[in-house]
Image (spheres, grey):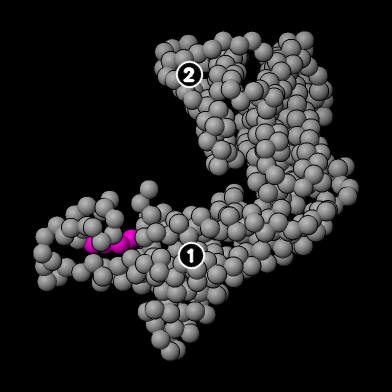
Amino acid sequence: MNITSQIGIRPTTTIENVSKPFGEQTLQQPPAIDQLTIEESVTKSILHDIKGMEAYFLKDTTTDDLTVDTTNLVVKHAYLHDQILRHFEGEEQTKRLDELERILTKRISFISESKAEYMGNLMNLQSDNLYVSGYACVALNGKTEAYVEEEKKKQAGEIILDKNELQTKIAQGIRDQISSFQSVIKTNQKEWQSVLETGGTGMNTFQQTVPNDIRSKRTPSHSMEDLGFNEITILSDALDTMRKGIHIVGSSDHVLAYLGLAKAKLNVFLEHQEMPDFLRNTIREKMNEAAAIKRKSVLEGESLRQSLHSWTIENSTRERDGIPKLSIDDLRIHQTDAQKADTKKMLAFHQAFEDLSNVKSAIFSQTFLALLDSFNDHLSNKYKPVDPGPEPIERAKRAREQVKESMINDWNTFAQKLFSSNEQLKKDYTVQVNPGDKINRTV
């Protein structure tokens, strides 16, 4: 990867081959009078990023990964800070440094607040997304907010994470990493000077030091109240495994399948990630509760959708026969035998995806693909196009393939991050797709 593009620097040079290391590149032709020299071009690019500091900070940030966001913020801040010192003096320098601090404070506030909100709501079982499915939202006809608040009250109990305290800890943790990074710079002054002079080349080497530094600062935490920043980043990673399963919108089949896959990711994460036992046990307990709430919500929403379908058919018949139609108050929630069988099938796939966490790593990839093929067949049989023509059938097929690709990518992204330092496990848990392959499996 071109490091300059990774960190948002745009050196505009007369370079013939930009893939060569800096210093080994050749000029395409002697520079014309209106062309910039390499040094002038790099300087212009640096000044451009200093001028647009806020936009520069936004690049590659606001991800779902607290460690990545912290790393980007720490390294970018140091880079811009030292570039300001190099290129400005006096009042202008002071003005630029003050602006940098203002933007930094704003970014830290945003990251710490958003992370604390998500983590606190999920661990305290107060996330809106747990309590209402897509179908239920439609069926509730504008009463969704009141319904969700009522359901959340039923689950209100012990506060596992205080969001205000968590936000303060995250903000302080980022500030501490900014301070710690100065020792990295001092130890590698020559390399850092090269980064500054070349407009960011070699920045990735320094970026790798931040996660390592976070991991090295393990605190003797014994409860959720005294979590250190290292443990908070681990908790953030654990909860992010559940994000898609909790937030995805779609049919009940899709939501339950993704929820099962999210639980599988969480189980594998808890098995392989080093952390205090109390933290592992608390995460497992609360996420089991969260998944149960989400599953119940999806099933209730599905039952409501099916009942609304029957209610609509009944009113169509009444309208045709001149009989007064039923009001929404006459809606009765019930399922036919066929609908109950369908719900049982959805739950079977949900459990099968969660059970992937119990599969041995050596056969994980083929087992995962077999389950996806079986799930695809289920969707094909259940959601047949109304129009039997070739185009609708092809569109439905493409949609199912996109679901399959999405679930594979979701898993692989997780596995490659978790096992980044273990090549064998990374290889075993990365799902390898061979075009045209299909393994049958019955669920």
Read off the magenta span: 9-13
Give residue 242's quadrant in the image: top right
Q: Residue at x 75, y 30 (%)?
A: 295
Q: Say what amino acid the circle numbered 1 marks.
A: Lys
Q: Residue at x 57, y 16 (%)?
A: 370
Q: Could you say which is closer to the camera, residue 54 or residue 141?
A: 54
Residue 32 to residue 314: above or below? below
**Percent position of residue 298, x then y:** 73, 30
Residue 281 to residue 326: above or below? below
**Percent position of residue 321, x then y:** 71, 12
Q: Residue at x 36, y 67 (%)?
A: 194
Q: Position of 396 compared to 260: left or right? A: left
The circle drawn on residue 397 is: 2
Residue 277 to residue 381: above or below? below
Give SS at disc 2: helix
Of the residues tagged 2 and 1, which is closer to the observer? 1
How many C-alpha atoms fall within 10 Å of the one at disc 2: few (<14), some, or many (≥20)? some
Magenta span contains residue 62: no
Q: Position of 41 compared to 291: left or right? A: left
Magenta span contains residue 12: yes
The circle drawn on residue 364 is: none
- The secondary structure that dominates the magenta segment is loop
How many numbered marks, from 0 up? 2
How many C-alpha atoms fall within 10 Å of the one at disc 1: few (<14), some, or many (≥20)? many
Q: Say what amino acid the circle numbered 2 marks.
A: Lys
The circle drawn on residue 76 is: 1
Q: Is residue 409 visible?
A: yes
Q: Could you say which is closer to the camera, residue 361 or residue 148?
A: 361
**Percent position of residue 235, x then y:** 71, 48
For marks 2 and 1, give the CA distance: 44 Å
